[in-house]
Image (tube, rainbow, N blue to C red):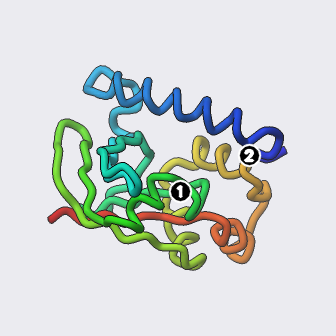
């Protein structure tokens, strides 16, 4: 069974609580400090700052962040409304411009990179979300078609 299939409301409420806890504990003593960044967007309705802890990959100073909920994630929808974001990562804080990407080939490239860098952890998460145990590029692209990623470039 894929995550979120039974009662998605309960799961996403639990994830929201977990996100608040992670954001509150974020810092050098936090175990996932090197794997998680804090992304702050402007709420599309309220205009208030909204902070979400997210896994990321850094390639040459550009930050790539995957969205398991695709374009439906609140933080992605906030970026679509206002692409200026703030990132806090490993003791650094900066403003960036975010680009939402939903092209399955580009998202699949991101997932491939994540699988190469973190094969056990990311592989497990992706298989829980529905990626076959033994997959090929077309499987990864079909999987990626339901997801999105955000590319953040510091300004």
Residue at x 26% of width, y 43% of height: 89
Q: Looking at the picture, tell me which residue is in the foreground, 17 or 96.
A: 17
Q: Looking at the picture, tell me which residue is in the foreground, 38 or 48.
A: 48
Q: Is residue 127 above or below residue 97?
A: above
Which residue is situated farthest in the front direction here? 46
Going from the N terminus, do you reach mark 1 or mark 2 first? 1
Quick check: can you spot residue 139?
A: yes
- For disc 2, the neighbor class at 10 Å (few under 14, some 14 to 19, many from 20) is some
Provide the secondary structure element on which disc 2 rests: helix
Q: Which residue is mark 1?
A: 67
Mark sitting on residue 92: none
- Horizontally, residue 66 falls left or right of residue 123, namely left
Residue at x 63% of width, y 39% of height: 12
Q: Which of the 4 quarters of the picture holds residue 6?
A: top right
Q: Nearer the viewer, mark 1 or mark 2?
A: 1
Quick check: can you spot residue 37?
A: no
Residue at x 51% of width, y 76% of height: 106
User: Which image quadrant: the C terminus?
Assistant: bottom left
Q: Which of the 4 quarters of the picture holds residue 32?
A: top left
Locate residue 146, reporting x and y percent. Answer: 67, 66
Provide the secondary structure element on which disc 1 rests: strand
- Horizontally, residue 90 falls left or right of residue 111, namely left
| Separation of marks 1 and 2 at Cα, in angstroms | 15 Å
1 and 2 marks in contact (CB < 8 Å): no
Residue at x 30% of width, y 20% of height: 29
Q: Which residue is mark 2?
A: 128
Locate residue 114, reporting x and y percent. Answer: 51, 56
Q: Looking at the picture, tell me which residue is in the foreground, 93 or 121.
A: 93
Locate residue 53, reporting x and y percent. Answer: 41, 40
């Amino acid at each position: 069974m894929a995550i979120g299939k039974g009662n998605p409301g309960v799961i996403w409420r639990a994830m929201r609580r977990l996100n608040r806890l992670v954001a509150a504990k974020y810092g050098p003593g936090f175990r996932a400090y090197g794997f998680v960044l804090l992304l702050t967007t402007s709420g599309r309705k309220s205009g208030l700052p909204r902070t979400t802890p997210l896994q990321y990959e850094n390639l040459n100073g550009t930050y790539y962040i995957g969205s398991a909920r695709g374009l439906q994630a609140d933080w992605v929808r906030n970026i679509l409304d206002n692409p200026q974001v703030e990132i806090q990562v490993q003791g650094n804080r900066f403003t960036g411009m975010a680009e939402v990407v939903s092209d399955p080939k580009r998202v699949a490239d991101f997932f491939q990179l994540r699988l190469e860098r973190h094969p056990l952890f990311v592989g497990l998460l992706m298989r829980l979300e529905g990626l076959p145990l033994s997959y090929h590029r077309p499987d990864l692209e079909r999987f990626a078609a339901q997801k999105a990623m955000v590319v953040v470039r510091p300004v």
